[in-house]
């Protein structure tokens, strides 16, 4: 779970490693309305202000993929699929 408050990402931006074929759930709570984007998978998720939002993703491509917010342009973490 990731939280964005006053443009600060918690936990701090880092890498999350998962195995190819895994089902990954990304849950984000943002203090402002925004949109989540998972690069490489072209998945998006509306982030309503103050309410947790989740997306489930079957990771079937290997590589390094940034997970970021669109409006605030914050990198939440890098997803490493091996």
Image: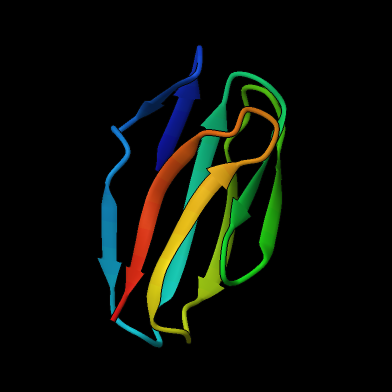
In the rendered view, does 17 fall on the left or right side of 71?
left
x, y percentage for residue 14?
A: 27, 45
Q: Quadrant of the N terminus?
A: top left
Which residue is at a point 50% across and 12% down the rendered structure image? Answer: 6
Which residue is at a point 46% across and 84% down the rendered structure image? Answer: 61
Q: Quadrant of the C terminus?
A: bottom left
Which residue is at a point 54% across and 45% down the rendered structure image? Answer: 68
x, y percentage for residue 8?
A: 42, 20
Which residue is at a point 68% across and 23% down the rendered structure image? Answer: 49
Front residue of 23 and 43: 43
Number of numbered labels in the structure image: 0
x, y percentage for residue 44?
A: 69, 56
Quarter assignment of residue 17? bottom left
* Residue 72 higher or lower than 17, as above or below: above
* Residue 53 higher or lower than 64, as above or below: above
x, y percentage for residue 77?
A: 38, 47
The image's colour scheme reads rainbow
In the rendered view, does 4 fall on the left or right side of 39?
left
* Residue 68 higher or lower than 15, as above or below: above
Quarter assignment of residue 52? top right
Front residue of 50 and 15: 15
Front residue of 32 and 74: 74
In the rendered view, does 80 fall on the left or right side of 68?
left
């Amino acid at each position: 779970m990731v939280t964005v408050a006053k443009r600060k990402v918690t936990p701090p931006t880092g890498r999350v490693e998962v195995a190819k074929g895994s089902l990954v759930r990304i849950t984000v709570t943002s203090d402002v309305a925004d949109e989540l984007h998972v690069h490489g998978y072209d998945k998006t998720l509306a982030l309503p202000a103050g309410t947790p939002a989740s997306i489930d993703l079957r990771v079937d491509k290997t590589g390094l993929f940034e997970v970021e917010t669109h409006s605030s342009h914050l990198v939440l973490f890098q997803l490493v699929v091996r």
